[in-house]
Image (spheres, rainbow, N blue to C red):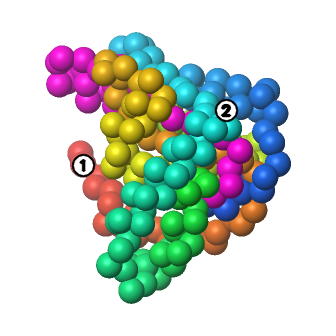
């Protein structure tokens, strides 16, 4: 797939086929993440690939988070988003994805380094999602499960010197949503040309 096609075809996938992913493809995705740019080339990221019983535990906990978060919804605030019951179902099983990948970043006492580490790990996350798209897989950049970060840390034995940046289910898409409109498609409001 041509590079700009990959960017334009990437979607937030929330329904996956149960098909397993070959380990070689997971490693290709993580290799792409590992080649992300990073501040001072420190490459401060780590990746947790979670499946099986640990994934089920995380899903059950995320389902509780979403249930609580959406308890006052009469309907989804964004009409293009899924209804409450579907959101809870998605959360409980991470959309049926066979694996989830968690991106971690090193921590640092200096806030400037900490910000740079977070930005670097975010670049790795983006590379990961684009690589998944290029391989015919899908993912979804998620931070909702971090609402109970203490639980994540306990189940996955994440040490205090690592920041949990984001989570993505990874799998073969069962449903590929239509592209969401850009807020400024012709870049007249979000771009300023300065001389």
Over which residues does the magenta segment extend? 95-122
From the viewer's side, name the closer residue of 78 and 178.
78
> Would you identify the image quadrant in which residue 150 lies?
top left
Q: Is residue 41 visible?
A: yes
Query: Does residue 62 lie above or below 28 as drawn?
Result: below
Task: Please provide percent x and percent y for residue 98.
Answer: 71, 44
| Residue wearing tag 2 | 29
Q: Earlier in the sequence, mark 1 or mark 2?
A: 2
Query: Does residue 55 lie above or below 16 as drawn?
Result: above
Q: Which mark is residue 194?
A: 1
Residue 116 is one of the magenta-drawn residues: yes
From the viewer's side, name the closer residue of 58 and 144.
58
Residue drawn at x 60%, y 41% is 55
Residue drawn at x 61%, y 31% is 49
Q: Is 65 displayed left or right of 193 in the figure?
A: right
Q: Residues within 10 Å of mark 2 (few under 14, many from 20)?
A: many
Task: Please provide percent x and percent y for residue 170.
Answer: 65, 45
Mark 1, mark 2: which one is toward the viewer?
Answer: 2
Per the image, label 1 sits on a secondary structure element best described as loop
For marks 1 and 2, give the CA distance.
Answer: 37 Å
Per the image, label 2 sits on a secondary structure element best described as helix
Q: Is 194 displayed left or right of 82 in the figure?
A: left
Task: Please provide percent x and percent y for residue 151.
Answer: 39, 39
Q: Residue furthest bottom?
A: 74
Q: Residues within 10 Å of mark 1 (few under 14, many from 20)?
A: few
Q: Is residue 140 visible?
A: no
């Amino acid at each position: 797939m041509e590079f700009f096609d990959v960017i334009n075809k990437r979607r937030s996938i929330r329904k996956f086929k149960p098909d397993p992913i070959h380990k070689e493809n997971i490693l290709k995705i993580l290799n792409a993440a590992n080649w992300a740019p990073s501040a001072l080339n420190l490459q401060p990221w780590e990746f947790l690939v979670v499946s099986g019983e640990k994934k089920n535990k995380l899903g059950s906990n995320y389902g509780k988070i979403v249930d609580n978060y959406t308890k006052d919804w009469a309907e989804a605030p964004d009409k293009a988003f899924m209804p409450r019951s579907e959101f809870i179902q998605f959360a409980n099983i991470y959309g049926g994805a066979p694996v989830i990948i968690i991106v971690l970043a090193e921590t640092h006492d200096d806030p400037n380094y900490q910000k740079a580490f977070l930005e670097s790990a975010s670049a790795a996350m983006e590379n990961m999602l684009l690589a998944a798209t290029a391989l015919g897989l899908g993912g979804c950049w998620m931070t909702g499960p971090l609402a109970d970060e203490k639980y994540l840390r306990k189940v996955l034995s994440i040490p205090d010197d690592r920041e949990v940046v984001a989570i993505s289910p990874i799998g073969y898409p069962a449903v590929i949503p239509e592209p969401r409109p850009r807020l400024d498609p012709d870049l007249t409001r979000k771009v300023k040309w300065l001389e």
